[in-house]
Image (cartoon, helix red, strand yellow):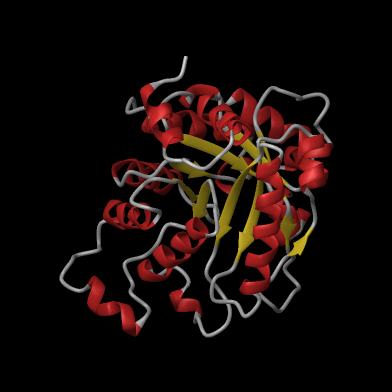
């Protein structure tokens, strides 16, 4: 039965067809957070982005794609996101056990431009039974306009076959300095761009209190942005006043207390959850399971 929380979320997607809404429903109804309106998603695209040793050597079990499927299922997560090869490697064994998100573009650590190659298709997502496609854009990059055109076409094709779209929106490149990539005004802007180009779920990084753009400083003046929950609330506000699902990435591996505090702040700020990869799969399985258990409890208000 559809819960009030899920029904309220789905009602915000006024133009979407039953197939897209059914796949959003699958994600929102999966696992231990099913029906709450909160999500915890496991993303494993770091091998593409950083290389296998940097991603998996610390926990060699993670070289095996089946490990990640099983971790997401056993932890009761909402979905599992990965590039084409990773999903194909477990698609039959784990078919139907957890909603999957096909990451359809990727980059590597050697490239000098802020861009990604399209590495998967909507046809691949449909063949693998995915609930959504995932796509990264880099607001700030000189190549972002091409990336937006790519995802516009992919999103239209995905929607035509009832598949939802998740957009990773990571500001970088162009005139944006490294110091501004996590700025609050920049992060909110990036989230808003993802919303405007039709993302059903927006994935962004947790922003700092720094305000980067001179032109935006007046709009942020007079408010104390030191509380991370307030910064989360502003990012959510920037996504059509909370009418779109917004999840926040876990970032680089850090201490467990910091991971838990991030989840508390996301919850307090009205975010829809976490998409957390390295902070879980780079730990031994028992530690990862314990961490995910606590994160789920935080989002359920039962820690």
User: Is there any visible trace of residue 38 in the rendered image?
Assistant: no
In this rendering, the answer to whether 280 lies above or below 150 is above
**Between 181 and 282, the one nearer to me in the picture:** 181
The furthest residue to the left: 222
**Between 110 and 93, the one nearer to me in the picture:** 93
**Between 212 and 219, the one nearer to me in the picture:** 219
On screen, residue 16 versus residue 99, left or right, reads left
Residue sitting at x 59%, y 31%: 18
On screen, residue 161 versus residue 182, left or right, reads right
In this rendering, the answer to whether 143 lies above or below 189 is below
User: Is there any visible trace of residue 233 in the rendered image?
Assistant: yes
| Percent position of residue 279, x then y | 55, 46
Residue sitting at x 73%, y 40%: 62
**Which quarter of the image is occupied by the C terminus?**
top left
Total marks in image: 0
In this rendering, the answer to whether 68 lies above or below 142 is above
**Quarter residue 124 falls in:** top right
In this rendering, the answer to whether 149 lies above or below 284 is below
Residue sitting at x 72%, y 48%: 157
| Percent position of residue 144, x then y | 62, 72
Residue sitting at x 65%, y 55%: 135
């Amino acid at each position: 039965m559809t819960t009030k929380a899920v029904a309220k979320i789905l009602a915000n997607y006024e133009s979407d067809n039953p197939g897209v809404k059914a796949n959003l429903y699958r994600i929102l109804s999966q696992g231990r957070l099913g029906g709450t309106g909160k999500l915890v998603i496991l993303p494993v695209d770091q091998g593409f982005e950083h290389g296998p040793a940097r991603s998996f050597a610390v926990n060699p079990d993670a070289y095996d794609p089946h490990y990640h499927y099983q971790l997401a299922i056993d932890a009761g997560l909402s979905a599992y996101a990965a590039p084409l090869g990773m999903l194909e490697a477990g698609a039959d064994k784990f078919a139907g056990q957890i909603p999957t998100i096909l990451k359809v573009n990727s980059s590597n650590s050697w490239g000098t431009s802020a861009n990604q190659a399209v590495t998967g298709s909507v046809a691949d997502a449909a063949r693998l039974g995915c609930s959504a496609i995932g796509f990264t854009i880099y607001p700030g990059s000189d190549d972002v306009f091409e990336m937006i055109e790519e995802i516009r076409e992919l999103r239209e094709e995905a929607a035509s076959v009832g598949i939802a779209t998740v957009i990773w929106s990571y500001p970088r490149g162009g005139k944006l300095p490294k110091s501004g990539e996590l700025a609050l005004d920049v992060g909110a802007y990036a989230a808003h761009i993802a919303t405007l180009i039709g993302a059903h779920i927006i994935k962004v990084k947790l922003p700092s209190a720094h305000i980067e753009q001179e032109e935006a400083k007046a709009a942020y003046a007079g408010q104390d942005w030191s509380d991370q929950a307030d910064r989360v609330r502003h990012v959510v506000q920037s996504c059509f006043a909370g009418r779109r699902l917004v999840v926040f990435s876990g970032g680089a591996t850090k201490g467990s207390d910091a991971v838990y505090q991030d989840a508390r702040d996301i919850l307090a700020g009205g975010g829809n959850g976490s998409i957390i990869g390295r902070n879980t799969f780079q730990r031994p399985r028992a530690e990862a399971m314990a961490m995910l258990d606590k994160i789920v409890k935080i989002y359920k208000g039962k820690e």
